[in-house]
Amino acid sequence: MKYSTRDLVTLAVFGSLWGLSEISLGTVIKSLNIPLSGMVLSTIGLTIALIGRVFVPQKGSTLFIGAIAMLLKLFSLGGVVMGPMIGIISEAIVAEVALSLTGKPKQGSMILAGSLGVLWVLAQPFITNPIMFGRSVLDVWLNLLVMGSRILGLDSSGPVWIIGGLAVIHFGVGCISGWLGWKLGNLLQTRLGNTPEYDKGAYQ
């Protein structure tokens, strides 16, 4: 992959926007104990990253944006930031893989990237919590069931329905994230009087 100076500046801008949203909104959302806060932050961050992908539709650009956002997360005040940092870069990797495997950027690939990226929020605790906090996978599973039961109003004795419901919510919201990334990215390009790079055959 080869980025021009303009591309690097553009990626830095979108990476900074994602990082700043995590630093500012993340602190507020978590302090207010808003349900599914991870999903909310992931949706906002991935939407920003996918808009950036429209501006720089080269392989690796989404990962680049995520890496910058992850580094900026270091400046968050208070609390443990390693988990969120891993979450940011993991979501960027998932979205990057989805976009890279589907060729030139298009609405369908953006929706797929957004949906899988947000869906990853459900899976991440099963990896990071045991490694970073010494919690067992069973504890993570039980906490997920309790949280899902409370949000969905379902009996915790029905894990399949709870996990299925949470997965559908995350996947659906992720689809919206991908769709917004595509639509807003194209709208901004049009407003700026630019021809989207993927229309110029510049995708590499």
Image (cartoon, grey):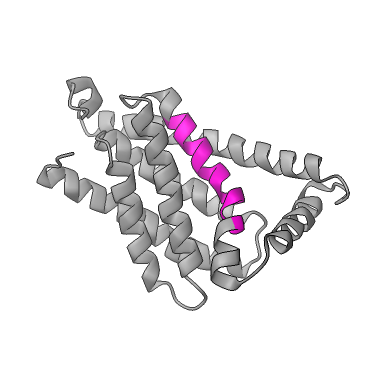
Q: Is residue 136 visible?
A: yes
Q: Is residue 177 visible?
A: no
In the depicted view, which residue is nearer to us: 197 or 88?
Answer: 88
Q: Residue at x 40, y 46 (%)?
A: 93
Task: Give yes or no for residue 61 being in the magenta stretch.
Answer: no
The residue positioned 63% from the left and 67% from the top of the image is: 32
> Can you say which quadrant of the picture contains the N terminus?
top left
Q: Kindly give the residue lying farthest to the bottom in the view shown.
A: 78
Identify the residue at horizontal 75%, vertical 51% (top origin): 148
The number of numbered discs placed on residues in the rendered structure image is: 0
Vertical comparison of 25 with 92: above or below? below
Which of the pair 189/126 is nearer the observer?
Answer: 126
Q: Position of residue 77 (x, y in %)?
A: 45, 76
Q: Is residue 130 above or below residue 186?
A: below
Q: Is residue 125 magenta?
A: yes
Is residue 193 found left or right of 42 in the rendered image?
left
Tell me the magenta residue range: 110-126
| Residue 14 x, y percent position in the rendering | 31, 49
Left or right: residue 189 versus residue 200 is right
Residue 168 placed where, x, y %? 67, 36
Quadrant of the rendered structure where residue 113 is?
Answer: top left
Residue sitting at x 33%, y 27%: 105
- Left or right: residue 120 compared with residue 154: left
**Image height of 40 relative to 29, above or below:** above
Q: Residue placed farthest to the left in the image?
A: 5
x and y, in percent, of residue 34 in the image = 65, 60
Q: Which secondary structure class fits the magenta region best? A: helix
> Could you say which quadrant of the image residue 204 lies in?
top left
